[in-house]
Every structure is written in structure tokens, then in C-alpha cells.
Image (spheres, rainbow, N blue to C red):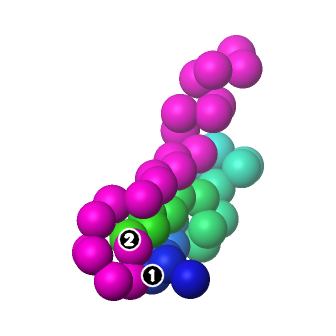
Amino acid sequence: MNNTFYGKINTSNTLNSNYASNISYDKITGKLVTTKDVRQYITRYR
């Protein structure tokens, strides 16, 4: 299992929540595994 941190992005968007973005690191190597940001998905589907 990776170490994952969740964060809220300051925006007035209704899709915003405490889990609007996250970043995961490999728990053994410390290397970045994934990042997700709700702002990337919003602009993609406009």
C-alpha cells in the first residue's frame, strides 16, 4: 500500500471536497506514484 495524502483546493467549484486532489508515494522507495487534481478533470470536460 502506498502513502497517500489528500487535499482540498480553494475554489468555488461544486466538485471541490477534502478529497479533490491527492498524491501518492511508494512506501518503500518514496518515489511519486500518482497525482490527481480535480481541476485537470474539470477543464478536460468543458
Separation of disc 2 and disc 1 at Cα? Answer: 5 Å
Q: Residue furthest top?
A: 46
Label whose residue precedes the other's in the sequence (2 or 1): 1
**As displayed, is residue 21 above or below residue 14?**
below
Instruction: Name the residue tied to disc 2.
Output: 25
- In the image, what residue type sits under mark 1? Asn
The residue stretch that appears in magenta: 26-46
**As displayed, is residue 1 above or below residue 41?**
below
What's the residue at 58%, 45% (across, down)?
38
- Foreground residue among 24 and 18: 24
- Residue 43 on the magenta segment: yes
The image quarter containing residue 13 is top right
Mark 2: which secondary structure? Answer: strand
**As displayed, is residue 16 above or below residue 26?**
above
Estimate how packed mark 1 is, as few (under 14), some (14 to 19) or many (20 or more) residues with alpha carbons within 10 Å. few
Q: Are marks 2 and 1 in contact (CB under 8 Å)?
A: yes
Instruction: Name the residue tied to disc 1.
Output: 3
Q: Position of residue 34 (x, y in %)?
A: 47, 55
What's the residue at 63%, 20% (across, down)?
44
Mark 1: which secondary structure? Answer: strand
Residue 7 visible in rendering: no
Q: Position of residue 23 (x, y in %)?
A: 43, 63
- Foreground residue among 39 and 28: 28
The image quarter containing residue 24 is bottom left
**As displayed, is residue 35 above or below residue 22?**
above
What's the residue at 39%, 73% (across, down)?
26
Quadrant of the drawing holding the C terminus: top right
Left or right placement of residue 26 versus residue 46 in this view = left
Q: Position of residue 35 (x, y in %)?
A: 45, 53
What's the residue at 50%, 63% (across, down)?
22
